[in-house]
Amino acid sequence: MKKLTTYGLGLVAGLAAIAATPAAYADDPQYFPMLVYRTGPYAPNGIPSANGMRDFYMLTNKRDGGVNGVEVAVEECETEYNTKIGVECYERLKGKHGGASLVNPYSTGITYQLIPKAPVDEVPILSMGYGRTAAADGRVFKWAFNFPTTYWSQASAFIRYVGEQEGGMENLNGKKIALVYHNSAYGKEPIATLEKLSGIHGYDLTTLAVDHPGQEQKATWLQIRRLRPDWIFLWGWGVMNQVAIQEAAAIKFPMDHFIGVWWSGSENDVIPAGDAAIGYKAGTFHSVGATAQVHKDILEHLYDGDVEEAKKNGFGEVLYNRGLVNAMLGIEAVRTAQAKYGNRRMTGAEVRWGLENLDVSEERLAELGFGDFTRPIKVTCEDHEGNGPVLIQQWDGEQWNLVSDWIPPIREVVRPMIEEAAAAFAAENNITPRDCSAES
């Protein structure tokens, strides 16, 4: 049996006490199951991600008194980033404590497996910035959400960014772009978009798969050395990223022309390469560091001002921050649902409505302590992505820095692809797309 960890987040003080406390909740907590991977080859990335989510859930109880007075409860299950184990964890956790609010699979493979289960179990899926891109079409994927942006949008934003760096999109013609990707459903997500845009803009695309877990890449980089691409996109995870950056440095590829997906842009990915990683870039959809008010609130309410203790949990790192944003959006979906259904524990079906009607404004972000840390987000029945733009960050040897403004996706290309893929899924699975104009 996989390890389960239960947190009664509002009832004890201090992280050590939290970790050791058995299940202890109010009568009707708002329950968030957490599928985590604190062990296995992807643990260095999974740990700060999980800690960021946990800390925002804790902050919601300690700073805000829960969600309009409803306590937040969390239970973890260790997936090892393994799809089969992840589905088992979901089945074990989904019905506890009155039922799951939503599920964050934290794996594209697990997301694919849970999409058919969501409408049956009435547990919505929030695969924030990952998962099945076609789920952005809410007419077909009523129970799945991937806001604030998707892999296909990110791939198109990368192309737009490269076009800007080359002096205009017309200068992409004849350029060589290589995609080094994790040989999994996750890694294959951007290929169709990059191929489509290649046909439009005339760049030459080469795709190079790297098998799990990604430690052996010599043959891949020999091909890159022969190809001599102008730009490389890295679609990796875990140790694959570290190895790829080190291999790129070994062949003296210019790091400022090497861009990673937002899951290939953490401190864990660049620090092992030392100074050789300086200049490497990656996508993101939030700011960097620990400068937002929410970070100050976490230090005050959870760590008694002890910055060093907080840093042991990844405080301020890229993936910790992403966990904060993820948990915040889930909490705000509950709050949105409460505005319709009342200030009590929301069911999964009610949270689904909250996700679909989410509208987090600049003012609300500021109230939550996020300020300009991330962008406002508005979700609709038709659009479960929110059409979020992308930022580019760059490593300077000590920290990440933002080096671009918000880059909009090439929506005129991406959205029709999403709708086509969603329609194909609907046909294969006998789904009648919703008429969103009839939805209240």
Image (tube, rainbow, N blue to C red):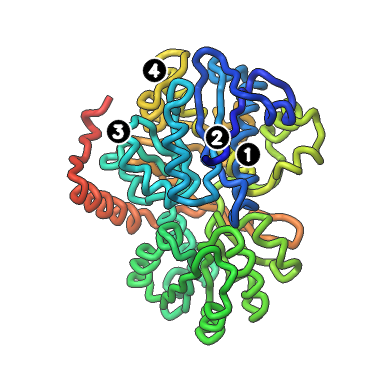
- Position of residue 365 relative to residue 30, above or below, is below
Closer mark to the observer between disc 1 and disc 3: 3
Q: Which residue is mark 1?
A: 52
- Name the amino acid, label 4: Lys
Question: In terms of secondary structure, where does tag 2 sit?
Answer: helix
**Dot 2, crowdedness within 10 Å: few (<14), some or many (≥20)?**
many
- Name the amino acid, label 2: Ala
Specify which label sits upstream in the sequence, 4 or 1: 1
The tag on residue 327 is 2
Specify which label sits upstream in the sequence, 1 or 2: 1
**Dot 3, crowdedness within 10 Å: few (<14), some or many (≥20)?**
few
| Mark-to-mark CA distance, 4 and 1 | 28 Å
The tag on residue 340 is 4
Q: Which residue is mark 3?
A: 120
Question: In terms of secondary structure, where does tag 4 sit?
Answer: helix
Horizontal side of 121 relative to 177 (left or right) equals: left
Specify which label sits upstream in the sequence, 1 or 3: 1
| Residue 279 x/y as whole percent | 67, 66
| Mark-to-mark CA distance, 3 and 4 | 23 Å
| Residue 322 x/y as whole percent | 58, 44
- Position of residue 275 relative to residue 297, above or below, is below
Closer mark to the observer between disc 3 and disc 4: 3
| Residue 2 x/y as whole percent | 54, 41
- Name the amino acid, label 1: Gly
